[in-house]
Amino acid sequence: MSDGAKRQQPLVASVVVTYGDVPGLKTLVSELDAIADSVTVIVENGVRTSLPCDPTGIVSGQGNIGYGSGVNLGYRTLVERGIEPEWLLICNSDLRVVARDLDNLRRRLVTTSAPIVAIRFARSRSTAVLPDWRSALLQCLLGEARVAKRYPKRNYPVGACFAIRTSLFLQLNGFDPDFWLYFEETDLFWRAISMNASIDWIDLDIQHYGGQSSPGTTILGYELGRSGAIFAHKRGWWFLATWSPTFLLQTLSVVFRSILRRHFQLALTNLFAIPGFLQGLGFPGYAPFERSKFNAAPRAVRHLHSSLLSPP
């Protein structure tokens, strides 16, 4: 690519992954489209009845390949159209943003030397801690917020909204399509932080209405646990042996705390994560979500669509 062509490339491409119509999606896309020197692409994993106005286009027809695979497909689609941004802004569809915050984010992307810009939401959870047996055990005793302060170098952003340089995204080969839902960003940031990639944090008044892009059911709780087991398998036998018991203990503590706070739906979701985790430990290839109402794409299909190289 010539120097002139490189200068014409956008600073940032926003990739929005959604599953059907989500309240506020049109407004979100309009705000993202308004970012100077940017493009937007929507990856539709479900069926849409009303399409938002999007100058770049909507990727659909691939089936429900999940969040991480959807991001990979969105990036590959941009490249196939000759669009090679410096940054990817990866967004859930159930976000509420304002132009002022997006302007501040754009300025940070221009000035930062870090390959990842993470966003601290003003009104909802936005930070997680890379898991191991110590952090899981401490979260049972102290709660996630205090553990995050104790291990700042192990903090990473939840997948709802963050920016990553495309150069690092390509080094990581994008998201791992073995994950359909949950733990895909945990796996991505584990690999990034293992490569000593730094994270630049910015405080913005972005609101995440978690769950609107993937309505909660017991099957999703089950998949939460199964994905956790797949994540553990990928980290090796020592991690699998030490983290698995503490993950189960941590999940049980969330169930009991949720019941005490009368958050019964959250308690039920985490309760179903336990059999999902146990199944994932012994039979990680069995994927019940493929036969659920979500019609999730099989692993082979996710790998096909999430390859960062165009299919032959």
Image (tube, rainbow, N blue to C red):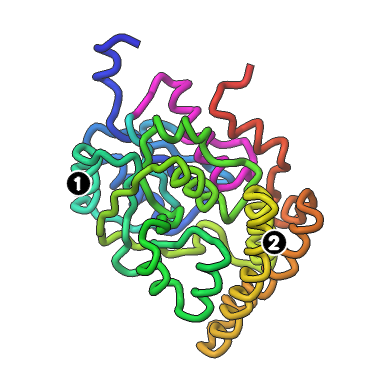
Q: Kindly identify the amino acid type of the residue bearing the numbered disc 2.
A: Ala
**Extreme residue in the front direction:** 238
Badge 1: residue crowd in 10 Å (few <14, some 14–19, many ≥20): some
> Residue at 26% across / 61% down in the picture?
205
Where residue 201 appears, x then y in whole percent? 29, 54
Find numbered disc 1 in the image and state the secondary structure of the residue it sits on.
helix
Q: CA gap, disc 2 to disc 1? A: 45 Å
Find numbered disc 2 in the image and state the secondary structure of the residue it sits on.
helix
Quarter of the image with the N terminus is top left
Badge 2: residue crowd in 10 Å (few <14, some 14–19, many ≥20): few
Evaluate if marks 2 and 1 touch, with contact meaning CB atoms under 8 Å apart.
no
Of residues 38 and 271, the one nearer the viewer is 271
Residue stretch rendered in magenta on the structure: 58-85
Q: Could you tell whether 269 is left or right of 67 in the image?
A: right
Read off the residue under disc 1.
103
Residue 227, visible in the rendered structure:
no
Of residues 202 and 140, the one nearer the viewer is 140
> Residue at 34% across / 45% down in the picture?
198
Q: Could you tell whether 48 is left or right of 64 in the image?
A: left
In the rendered structure, does residue 80 fall within the stretch colored magenta?
Answer: yes
Read off the residue under disc 2.
241
Q: Kindly identify the amino acid type of the residue bearing the numbered disc 1.
A: Asp
In the rendered structure, does residue 181 fall within the stretch colored magenta?
Answer: no
Of residues 218 and 200, the one nearer the viewer is 200
Among the 4 quarters of the image, the one containing residue 292: bottom right
